[in-house]
């Protein structure tokens, strides 16, 4: 790919806003509050996500400390439930999703040769809603009666008739989070549809852009459904409706259908961009073109489409008729096929490449193996009769932390290490980063692998206390958890150093094998890129 | 994308409005939350004030932001490409609205084809009926719930039918307004758009009347079981959308009186009319699935 | 290199085979790694399915990761490996789409068979109505005149680390469910409040208890014994303290047990009637009341009567427990619909009710001096 400058339309040359093409950023706090720049907004999203990761992680530490040994030591069960709930909510809506949106902000315009996101002011709005939404959510923990304690899945009627008053705040904070996600997704979609540089045809689009396009579609399709679900929870709790109450002709299971119609696509929202990231990093450090570009695109689309018809695999024990159970079991199993295609393509990309193992590559390789392990346990969960045994045990917890922590989170870390030099113009502290990787890799497996065992042995999830047979493994799990948590402080150190612009300057391409428009522009990437679009040949 | 016709994409300067909007949503969320919580316990206070403050901030933000937007548009900063961005953005926004209604339609279909029959003993739920609700019989509309709340169903003839006709006609007048705008026939444009707004108001008036009728004469309330729930939430959210749509049309009307929009450049008008058509389609679905069937 | 790989493969397949994992599966084993085989034909089938899935996944994993490691090892730049040029191959791509699909069919067929068998609740030999409520189970034998609540029996002091934890810590109840071996027992599962889930791993039965609906499940237990499980759906504060214990007895023994229970329950009802004409001593009431309170009420209103602010009201100094006696009796009997405060009228006996009311009216400095007798409760219960 090479770029050439195109002359902008003569008629618009006399535009009175010439000054905003100056290539340096406004300064002070208002730069961040009022910004319309995709790079600034990307940075805001990424820092926000990281802070949320630390807060959500701190809650996980409370969970792990309480579960360190049997008996109640540190928190009471009601508070424990709030920790579990808010940990799940923060990690999903506050850490992973905003981090991916931040990456999209930074990268999508640069990858498709656009000057910015299509709707820059709305972009700023999407971001600034988030800190407020989480302020409400976290703030509700300090109210009399406490915050949400019904699990991140807030099943009715635990979240309706039997919940505390602050449920109303929970509902409205989810509403505004949803508004933020939908606006963010609309922005990404429109940018990709409408702002590609000349010659950037659909099948030339980088995979991160493709996966985000499909993710954005999923977001717009399911976030409103979540909004509907919380709205019904609100009216059931406060206004006397009975959507989820059999006495009035409703059904608690209806809630689960609506929630998981959102919830299952939601988990793919948290993994598809990761697939995109890995599809950039593996070819770069294998010095070989991505194997099967087209099938990668089709596989992503198939996963997204299938994700709409598998939701009830979370509900196998709710007593659906056997026909429905069979349908959802088969549909769920099918998702392994396109996901497998992706894994095989990555491996084929590495095959007979010329590999080096820089930090982003280390995270990407760990991603492939550990995500696949999480996928395997997912496939086991899909087998309905066996899911009766696994459901709501730590086996499920193990499954989703493998796909989320060593999947989504590892891919985000890989992405940050991969593009950070481009953003700052300086190489990060490689030694620290390697420490971060190896400490994380070892501790994360100590943390989550034994969860498979206690799950199979019968330990239910969402309990603050457990019977004695689970004590030994839980101790190890907690130790792994603390170690993994501390390892993230190394990451914090790397990031602080990088944001202070310490380190060796890098050249434009940064990594020897890197391909794509973002590597053609200077490092650090100028405040405004592609004022005139490049032509992609 | 024809390469040579590339126009400079307008990337706006810094703007205060988004963050004002974020603060507004924050206040609205907190205010609405507290407001609702006040209905169940005296512990909570101040909801109304915070909520009003939030709505006020939102209003300020909308006025400021749109003023900005209109000024930019009027001074010719916008390219065709930007116009496309706005149109696509609006289209996806409407898609998200469709999915919001889908959640409630989903609840309606589930309640009617699954929950209620199961409570009546269908499928694998024979014992549900026998042991827990022995006197309950499945029916739709659910005029007698398992716990014995009774109500009356809302018929489709009469008022709802008139409302359907009103809204369908308004969709047509809205379309005529658009055609007139494209032909640059300004007086026809104001006439058709005015008619659309009047029809919208008429619809809303009748809807209010219908609600009063439901509460007073039919005993059909928000509390009367899942039939009443789906009825009021679907028609209620639809009504809120009509209200919003009418307000949008009114703003457009004022802008037209001020001479805004040209046959080529009228994104705001187009967005408003799309929204109106969308609201209309939702109503038709409502009429079929909530009232007739 | 090849050699290390083959030995690695052998090692992993060994790990996956039943040898290492399965033998450790006794229920108290602190290092139990694998799913239980259970004690029913179905649970055995489920276990086999689990092992089938597991083995397939391990094999695929070994192949995929193996290839990956080989290329990570051989095709590295530091070894001077030059990148090849290929980047697609329709043949290969079709192959690795079709092969996994076929593998999936292999899994789906036995899974579907087992599932259909598990969901076939027709023609049971007996039925038990299992009702979950916060946080206990209620069992009602549909074919006998026997029903009772089953509550966690672990002492609070063990949970709070004051006493040493017993062998069955958190997995013990006061009155277990008793079922006969060799008979098809159908469970009709429902709930009084939130969703719970009734789970006994050894039977491979886990079914949600949905309020207002009845789900069905069944089992035929082959071996007599004591089988322990837990509630498996988040149901509020004490979700972790809601165990299930089932005792399977030989049919003859079971018949004997039911007959005995029926007689005992009959006797208890007669005893209740007798109490109506008597007055109980304050001290007796307080003693019984404290016991009843700690087992039934303390979960929400806390052992010290202070409740959890904003969630469960304090009984210490509440207007109801200190003044409004009729309201107090009423809320105990009928609960308060739409809140977690359940109706205890059918859960506790008249004497227990009167005791716990007396207790709450006099404990923690409530000191009203009121004594509530069984007949007072009876009067409210029957609308007098
Ligand atoms: C990023 C998030 C993510 C991802 C990607 C996945 C991926 C998958 N998940 Fe997971 N899942 C969650 C997040 C995720 N999940 C969460 C958060 C929960 C719990 C929610 C809660 O209750 O709180 C959950 C729960 C969950 C359940 C419910 C369990 C229960 O509660 O009882 C099930 C059941 O079917 C399931 C299945 C699957 C399957 C089949 C996949 C598949 O997509 C996996 C496909 C991948 C592979 C299979 C590996 C690679 C493939 C090959 C190498 C090809 C060859 C393989 C074969 C043919 C075997 N998941
Ligand atoms: C992307 C999503 C995501 C991520 C990243 C994580 C990360 C972690 N999760 Fe989470 N988890 C969920 C999503 C996620 N989780 C969800 C959806 C649930 C279900 C909730 C529900 O049931 O409703 C759940 C539930 C869940 C449980 C089950 C709780 C229960 O059932 O009761 C546990 C238990 O161990 C757990 C642990 C952890 C740990 C130890 C981490 C670690 O990876 C966290 C590591 C990070 C840090 C620790 C922060 C950094 C360090 C510091 C701030 C310094 C302080 C450090 C120390 C004092 C050591 N999680
Ligand atoms: Cu009952 Cu969990
Ligand atoms: Cu899922």
Image (spheres, grey):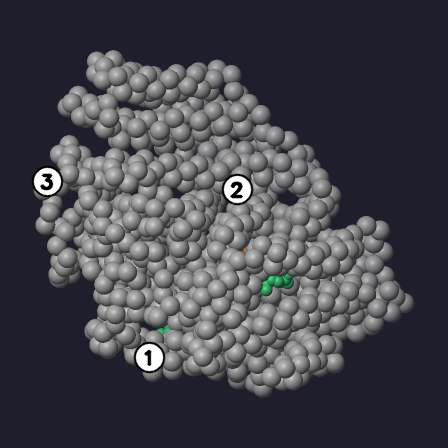
Residue at image location 25% in from the left, 70% down from the top? A507
Q: Are marks 3 and 1 in contact (CB under 8 Å)?
A: no
Q: Give the quadrant of residue C89.
A: bottom right
Is disc 3 surrounded by few (<14), some (14 to 19) or many (20+) residues within 10 Å? few
Q: Chain of mark 3?
A: A
Labels 2, 1: front one: 1
In the picture shown, does residue A442 fall above or below A154? Answer: below
Q: Quadrant of ligand 4?
A: bottom right
Work out which quarter of the rendered image holds the N terminus of chain A and state it: bottom left
Asked if badge 3 and badge 1 are on a common chain, one would say: yes
- Of label 2 and label 1, which has the lower sequence position? 2
Q: Are marks 2 and 1 in contact (CB under 8 Å)?
A: no
What is the C-alpha distance between the residues marked 3 and 1?
47 Å
Foreground residue among C365 and A180: A180
Foreground residue among A57 and C334: A57
Image coords of residue C182 (percent x, y): 86, 64
Q: Are marks 2 and 3 in contact (CB under 8 Å)?
A: no
- Of label 2 and label 3, which has the lower sequence position? 3
Residue to which mark 1 is pinned: A430
Spot the residue most to the right.
C252
Residue at image location 59% in from the left, 57% down from the top? C93
Q: Is residue A249 left or right of residue A407?
A: right
Image coords of residue B174 (percent x, y): 33, 20
Residue to which mark 3 is pinned: A14
Asked if badge 2 and badge 1 are on a common chain, one would say: yes
Residue to which mark 2 is pinned: A242
Residue at image location 18% in from the left, 34% down from the top? B73
Q: Chain of mark 1?
A: A
Q: Is residue B93 left or right of residue C145?
A: left
């Amino acid at each position: 790919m090479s770029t050439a400058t195109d002359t902008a339309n003569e008629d618009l040359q006399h535009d009175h806003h010439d000054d905003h093409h100056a290539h340096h950023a406004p300064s002070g706090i208002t730069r961040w509050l009022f910004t319309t720049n995709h790079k600034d907004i990307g940075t805001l999203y990424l820092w926000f996500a990281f802070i949320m990761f630390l807060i959500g992680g701190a809650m996980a530490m409370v969970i792990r400390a309480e579960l360190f040994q049997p008996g109640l030591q540190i928190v009471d069960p009601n508070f424990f439930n709030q920790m579990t709930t808010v940990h799940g909510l923060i990690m999903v809506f506050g850490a992973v999703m905003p981090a991916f949106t931040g990456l999209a902000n930074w990268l999508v315009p640069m990858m498709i040769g656009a000057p910015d996101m299509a709707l820059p002011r709305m972009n700023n709005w999407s971001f600034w809603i988030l800190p407020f939404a989480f302020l409400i959510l976290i703030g509700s923990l300090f109210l009399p009666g406490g915050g949400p304690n019904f699990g991140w899945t807030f099943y009715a009627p635990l979240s309706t008739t039997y919940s505390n008053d602050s449920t109303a705040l929970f509902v409205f904070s989810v509403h505004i989070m949803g508004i933020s996600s939908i606006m963010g997704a609309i922005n990404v979609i429109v940018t990709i549809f409408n702002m590609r540089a000349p010659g950037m045809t659909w099948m030339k689009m980088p995979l991160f852009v493709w996966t985000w396009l499909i993710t954005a579609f999923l977001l717009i399709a399911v976030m409103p459904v979540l909004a509907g679900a919380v709205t019904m929870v609100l009216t059931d709790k406060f206004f006397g409706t009975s959507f989820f109450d059999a006495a009035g002709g409703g059904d608690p299971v209806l809630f689960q259908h609506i929630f998981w119609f959102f919830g299952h696509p939601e988990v793919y929202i948290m993994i598809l961009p990761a697939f995109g990231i890995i599809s950039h990093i593996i070819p770069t450090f294998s010095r070989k073109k991505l194997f099967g570009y087209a099938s990668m695109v089709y596989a992503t689309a198939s996963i997204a489409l299938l994700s709409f018809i598998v939701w009830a695999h979370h509900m196998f024990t709710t007593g659906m008729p056997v026909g429905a159970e069979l349908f959802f079991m088969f549909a769920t199993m099918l998702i392994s096929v396109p996901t497998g295609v992706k894994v095989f393509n990555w491996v084929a990309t590495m095959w007979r490449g010329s590999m080096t193992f820089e930090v982003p590559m280390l995270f990407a390789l760990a991603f492939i193996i550990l995500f696949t392990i999480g996928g395997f346990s997912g496939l086991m969960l899909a087998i309905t009769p066996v899911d009766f045994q696994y459901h709501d045990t730590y086996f499920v917890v193990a499954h989703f932390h493998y796909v989320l922590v060593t999947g989504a989170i590892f891919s985000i870390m890989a992405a940050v290490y991969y593009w950070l030099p481009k953003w700052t113009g300086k190489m990060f502290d490689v030694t620290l980063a390697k420490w971060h990787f190896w400490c994380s890799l070892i501790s994360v497996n100590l943390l989550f692998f034994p969860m498979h065992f206690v799950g199979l042995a019968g330990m239910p999830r969402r309990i603050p206390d457990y019977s004695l047979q689970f004590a030994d493994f839980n101790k190890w799990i907690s130790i792994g958890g603390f170690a993994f948590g501390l390892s993230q402080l190394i990451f914090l150190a790397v990031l602080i150093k990088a944001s202070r612009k310490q380190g060796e300057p890098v050249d434009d391409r940064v990594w020897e094998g890197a391909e794509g428009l973002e590597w053609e522009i200077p490092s650090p990437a100028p405040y405004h890129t592609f004022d005139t679009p490049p032509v992609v040949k | 994308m024809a390469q040579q016709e590339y126009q400079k994409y307008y990337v706006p300067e810094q703007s205060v409005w988004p963050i004002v909007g974020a603060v507004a949503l924050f206040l609205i969320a907190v205010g609405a939350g507290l407001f609702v919580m006040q209905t169940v316990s005296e512990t909570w206070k101040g909801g109304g004030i915070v909520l009003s403050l939030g709505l006020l901030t939102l209003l300020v933000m909308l006025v400021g932001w749109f003023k900005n937007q209109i000024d930019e548009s009027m001074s010719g900063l916008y390219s065709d490409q930007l116009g496309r961005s706005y149109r696509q953005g609006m289209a996806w926004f409407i898609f998200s609205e469709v999915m919001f209604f889908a959640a409630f339609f989903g609840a309606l279909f589930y309640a009617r084809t699954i929950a209620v029959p199961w409570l009546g003993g269908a499928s694998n739920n024979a014992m549900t009926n026998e042991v827990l609700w022995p006197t309950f019989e499945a029916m739709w509309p659910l005029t007698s719930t398992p716990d014995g709340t009774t109500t009356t169903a809302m018929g489709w003839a009469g008022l709802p039918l008139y409302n359907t006709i009103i809204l369908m006609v308004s969709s047509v007048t809205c379309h005529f307004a658009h055609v007139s705008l494209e032909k640059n026939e300004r007086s026809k444009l104001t006439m058709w758009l005015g008619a659309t707004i009047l029809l919208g108001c008429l619809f809303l008036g009748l809807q209010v009347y219908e609600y009063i009728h439901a509460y007073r004469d039919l005993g059909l309330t928000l509390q009367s079981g899942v039939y009443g729930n789906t009825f009021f939430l679907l028609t209620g959210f639809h009504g809120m959308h009509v209200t919003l749509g009418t307000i949008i049309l009114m703003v457009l009307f004022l802008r037209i009186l001020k001479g805004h929009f040209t046959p080529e450049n009228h994104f705001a008008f187009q967005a408003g009319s799309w929204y109106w058509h969308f609201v209309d389609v939702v109503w038709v679905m409502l009429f079929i699935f909530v009232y007739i069937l | 290199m090849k050699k290390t790989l083959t030995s690695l493969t052998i090692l992993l397949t060994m790990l996956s085979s039943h040898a290492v994992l399965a033998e450790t599966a006794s229920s108290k084993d602190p290092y139990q790694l694998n799913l239980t085989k259970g004690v029913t034909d179905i649970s055995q089938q489920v276990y086999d399915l689990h092992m089938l899935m597991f083995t397939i996944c391990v094999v695929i994993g070994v192949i995929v990761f193996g290839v990956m490691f080989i290329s990570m090892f051989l095709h590295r730049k530091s070894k001077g490996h030059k990148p090849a040029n290929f980047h697609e191959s329709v043949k290969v791509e079709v192959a690795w789409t079709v092969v996994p699909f076929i593998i999936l069919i292999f899994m789906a067929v036995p899974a579907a068979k087992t599932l259909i068998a598990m969901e076939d609740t027709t023609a049971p030999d007996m039925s038990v109505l299992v009702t979950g409520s916060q946080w206990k189970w209620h069992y009602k034998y549909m074919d006998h005149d026997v029903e009772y609540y089953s509550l966690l029996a672990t002492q609070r002091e063990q949970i709070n680390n004051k006493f040493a934890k017993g062998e069955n810590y958190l997995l013990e109840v006061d009155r277990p469910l008793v079922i006969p071996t060799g008979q098809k027992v159908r469970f009709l599962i429902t709930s009084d409040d939130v969703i719970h889930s009734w789970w006994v791993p050894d039977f491979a039965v886990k079914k949600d208890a949905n309020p207002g609906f009845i789900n069905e499940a069944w089992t035929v237990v082959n071996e007599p014994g004591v089988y322990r499980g837990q509630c498996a759906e988040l149901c509020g504060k004490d979700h972790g303290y809601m165990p299930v214990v089932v005792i399977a007895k030989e049919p003859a023994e079971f018949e004997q047990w039911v007959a005995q229970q029926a007689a005992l329950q009959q006797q208890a009802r007669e005893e209740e009637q007798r109490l109506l004409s008597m007055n109980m001593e304050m001290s007796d009431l307080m003693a019984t009341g404290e016991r009843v309170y700690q087992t039934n009420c303390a979960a929400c209103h806390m052992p010290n009567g202070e409740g959890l602010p904003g969630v469960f009201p304090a009984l210490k100094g509440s207007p109801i427990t200190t003044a409004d006696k009729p309201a107090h009796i009423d809320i105990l009997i009928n609960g308060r619909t739409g809140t977690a405060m359940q109706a205890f009228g059918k859960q506790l006996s008249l004497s227990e009710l009167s005791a716990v009311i007396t207790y709450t009216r006099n404990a923690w400095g409530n000191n009203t001096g009121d004594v509530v007798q069984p007949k007072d409760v009876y009067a409210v219960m029957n609308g007098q």
